[in-house]
């Protein structure tokens, strides 16, 4: 199980309503550069070319609270390459609707990946416990 | 899964069917390649392959014919002892070479072919592999009626040339026919540029010289399970160290209150 690391600014940005996790479009970004603590926007990343990659959009399944616990559930994402993509190691999720495409956090795959034509990269989100909870 | 070269078998044949032994270590799912060539049959010919083989390319004239096939190995292939290819025009002086590739997908196969006459070097324009980490296989196919002891070497591509391993190199004077096979793993998925193989006969230039460059790739699947991130808000603590009691508003004790005795 890979740990999703929220960026430092996420909590403040959430409190100051930079994100609307219920309605905003969340998207995946790929980079081969390790995270820097001050990063908070998509423009901080050096992204790979997505010319040979399928849609990076994430579908929000549910965004709701039960007994005071908020849970955001995201559908799994399958990225399919139609040519070379990468190399990359870090998978970011950012809010494509937010004013500055604010980052939410990232996953360190642990090794560098280059996708070839026909190759896939799947992000399996927890469909029971959710991607994110707030209590 | 890496794509790797397996093993090869080869044979010569006259005006009969070409029967090539099964390469050792062949497994179900391997891709089997077969290359046939002939000299002196008098017309361009093709070969009827065993069940399941697909023609990748063929060419030739009345002097030389050549054809390359492939198929995915089945249990019957693994259990069999040989592959038989039937020439369409009687055969001539023939040579057949069969080799297997492991870990590749037939949907990724790319190839390019070219031929020269009276030349010891044959090049192709090269190809762009299906993806990264591709296995390149170069086949040099020669016919010559007068030269002997022809060897092949100098396998190369112009861009990001990998280290080539020669898998086979044989010319049989009596059959006027020779094949060479070399393979290499190339990490780059970019265009190869011009590919080259060079023949060295005992004298002069070889009569007809074909080169077939083939790339075979695989398809990789990566996945990652994303753990749930929990954000917890802190409990609110209210300090009680500064509570003051207004003694002027204390209620009068009632009879139900407990009387405390003086210590």
Image (tube, helix red, strand yellow):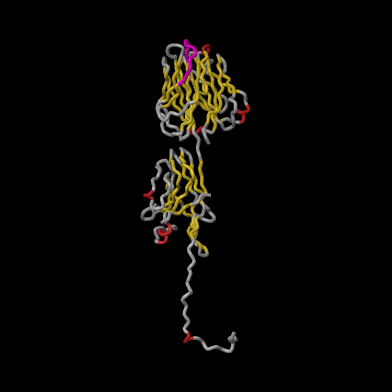
Residue in the picture at 41% in, 58% down: A19
In the rendered structure, the answer to whether residue B135 lies left or right of residue A48 reads right
Residue B125 percent coordinates (x, y): 40, 26
Image coordinates for residue B248, horizontal then vertical, percent: 47, 87
> Which residue is most to the top?
B146
| Residue B119 among magenta residues | no
Query: As rendered, which of B76 and B204 lies closer to the eye?
Result: B204
Is B83 drawn above or below residue B144 in the view shown? below
Point 48% across, 15% down: residue = B150
Residue B43 appears anywhere in the view: no
Count of number-bearing discs: 0
The secondary structure that dominates the magenta segment is loop
Q: Quadrant of residue B210?
A: top left
Q: Position of residue B89 (x, y in %)?
A: 52, 16
Q: Position of residue A47 (x, y in %)?
A: 39, 45
Question: Is residue B150 covered in magenta?
Answer: yes
Magenta segment range? B143-153
Query: Which residue occupies the extreme right position in the image?
Result: B79
The outermost residue toward the front is B263
Point out the image quarter for the C terminus of chain B: bottom right
Q: Is residue B144 visible?
A: yes
Q: In the image shown, does B227 or B53 lie closer to the viewer?
A: B227
Is residue A2 shown above or below B103? below
């Amino acid at each position: 199980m890979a740990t999703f690391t929220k960026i430092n600014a996420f909590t403040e940005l959430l409190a100051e309503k930079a994100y609307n996790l219920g309605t905003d479009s969340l998207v995946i970004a790929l980079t081969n550069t390790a995270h820097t603590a001050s990063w908070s926007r998509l423009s901080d990343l050096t992204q790979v070319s997505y010319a040979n990659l399928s849609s990076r959009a994430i579908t929000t399944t549910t965004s709701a609270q039960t007994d005071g616990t908020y849970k955001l559930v995201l559908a799994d994402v399958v990225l399919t390459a139609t040519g070379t993509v990468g190399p990359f190691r870090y998978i970011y999720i950012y809010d494509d609707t937010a004013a500055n495409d604010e980052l939410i956090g990232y996953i360190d795959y642990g090794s560098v990946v280059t996708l070839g034509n026909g190759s896939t990269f799947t992000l399996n989100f927890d469909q029971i416990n959710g991607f994110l909870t707030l209590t | 899964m890496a794509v790797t070269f397996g093993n090869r078998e080869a044979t010569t044949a006259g005006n009969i069917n070409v029967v090539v032994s099964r390469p050792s270590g062949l497994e179900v799912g391997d891709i089997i390649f077969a290359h046939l060539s002939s000299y002196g049959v008098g017309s361009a010919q093709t070969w009827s392959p065993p069940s399941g083989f697909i023609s990748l390319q063929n060419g030739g004239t009345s002097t030389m014919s050549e054809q390359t096939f492939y198929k995915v190995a089945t249990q019957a292939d693994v259990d069999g002892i040989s592959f038989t290819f039937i020439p369409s025009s009687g055969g001539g002086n023939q040579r057949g070479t069969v080799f297997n590739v492991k870990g590749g997908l037939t949907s990724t196969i790319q190839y390019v072919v070219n031929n020269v006459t009276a030349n010891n070097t044959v090049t192709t324009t090269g190809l762009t592999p299906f993806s990264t980490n591709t296995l390149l296989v170069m086949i040099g196919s020669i016919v010559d009626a007068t030269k002997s002891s022809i060897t092949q070497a100098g396998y190369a591509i112009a861009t990001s040339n990998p280290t080539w391993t020669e898998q086979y190199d044989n010319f049989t004077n009596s059959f006027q026919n020779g094949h060479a096979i070399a393979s290499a793993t190339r990490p780059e998925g970019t265009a190869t540029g011009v590919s080259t193989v060079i023949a060295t006969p005992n004298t002069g230039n070889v009569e007809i010289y074909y080169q077939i460059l083939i790339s075979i790739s695989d398809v990789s699947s990566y996945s990652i399970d994303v753990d749930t991130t929990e954000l917890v808000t802190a409990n609110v603590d209210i300090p009680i160290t500064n509570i003051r009691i207004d003694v002027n508003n204390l209620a009068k004790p009632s009879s139900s209150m407990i009387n405390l005795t003086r210590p």
